[in-house]
Image (cartoon, rainbow, N blue to C red):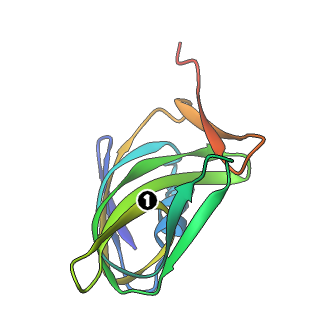
């Protein structure tokens, strides 16, 4: 992984074998713990994506891949157990069928290119709820 920070923008390149969530979360070691992920593209494998059902339970679909990462958005915020990433994604398989949802896991197969917009580190945080969902809470920025 390599990254470059220009003001509040971070450009991140992920290399084969690196996991997307872990890589973004590792930015906290460089003082970046609160950001909006505005775009992500590349080629990934070992994919787990899904959705939160009406009972508040995450349903997971597994795609061994590789798949083309068409779009990824989300955020990075402090969580109850450290940096927390919440990502949604669109990917296409080799037949050009598109799959999307909440991204739980994806390993870089060829490359990942991600843009983040860094926020004030007190802008938001994640807190547990009574379901599997970890809620986004906004902080007072006075």
**Residue for point 62% across, 44% down:** 78
**From what the image shows, is residue 128 above or below residue 111?**
above
**Residue for point 60% across, 52% down:** 53
What residue does disc 1 label? Answer: 101
Q: Position of residue 46 (x, y in %)?
A: 48, 83
**From what the image shows, is residue 28 above or below residue 66?**
above
Occupied quadrant, residue 59: bottom right
User: Looking at this rendering, what residue extends furthest in the right direction?
Assistant: 130
In this view, the residue in front, 2 or 93, is 93
User: Looking at this rendering, what residue extends furthest in the front direction?
Assistant: 54
Decide if residue 41 is in sight here.
Answer: no
**Residue for point 57% across, 68% down:** 60
Q: Is residue 106 left or right of residue 69?
A: right
In this view, the residue in front, 26 or 16, is 16
Q: Position of residue 64 (x, y in %)?
A: 46, 87
Q: Is residue 90 left or right of residue 75?
A: left
| Element assignment for label 1 | strand
**From what the image shows, is residue 112 above or below residue 128?**
below
Decide if residue 39 is in sight here.
Answer: yes
**From what the image shows, is residue 139 above or below residue 86?**
above
**Residue for point 68% across, 47% down:** 55
Q: Is residue 59 left or right of residue 3?
A: right
How many neighbours does mark 1 have within 10 angstroms: few (below 14), some (14-19), or many (20 or more)? some
User: Looking at this rendering, what residue extends furthest in the left direction?
Assistant: 96
* Position of the N terminus by quadrant: bottom left
In this view, the residue in front, 112 or 90, is 90
Q: Position of residue 119 (x, y in %)?
A: 43, 36
**Number of residue marks:** 1
């Amino acid at each position: 992984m390599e990254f470059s920070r220009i003001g509040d923008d971070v450009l991140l390149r992920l290399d084969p074998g690196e996991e997307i969530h872990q890589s973004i979360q590792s930015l906290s070691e460089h003082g970046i713990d609160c950001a909006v992920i505005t775009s992500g593209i590349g080629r990934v494998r070992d994919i787990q994506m899904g959705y939160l059902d009406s009972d508040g339970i995450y349903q997971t679909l597994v795609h061994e891949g590789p798949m083309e990462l068409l779009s990824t958005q989300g955020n990075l915020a402090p969580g109850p157990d450290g940096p927390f990433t919440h990502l949604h994604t669109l990917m296409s398989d080799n037949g050009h069928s598109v799959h999307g949802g909440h991204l739980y896991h994806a390993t870089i197969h060829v490359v990942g290119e991600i843009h983040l917009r860094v926020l004030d580190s007190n802008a938001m945080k994640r807190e547990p709820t009574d379901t599997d969902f970890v809620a986004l809470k906004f902080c007072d920025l006075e």
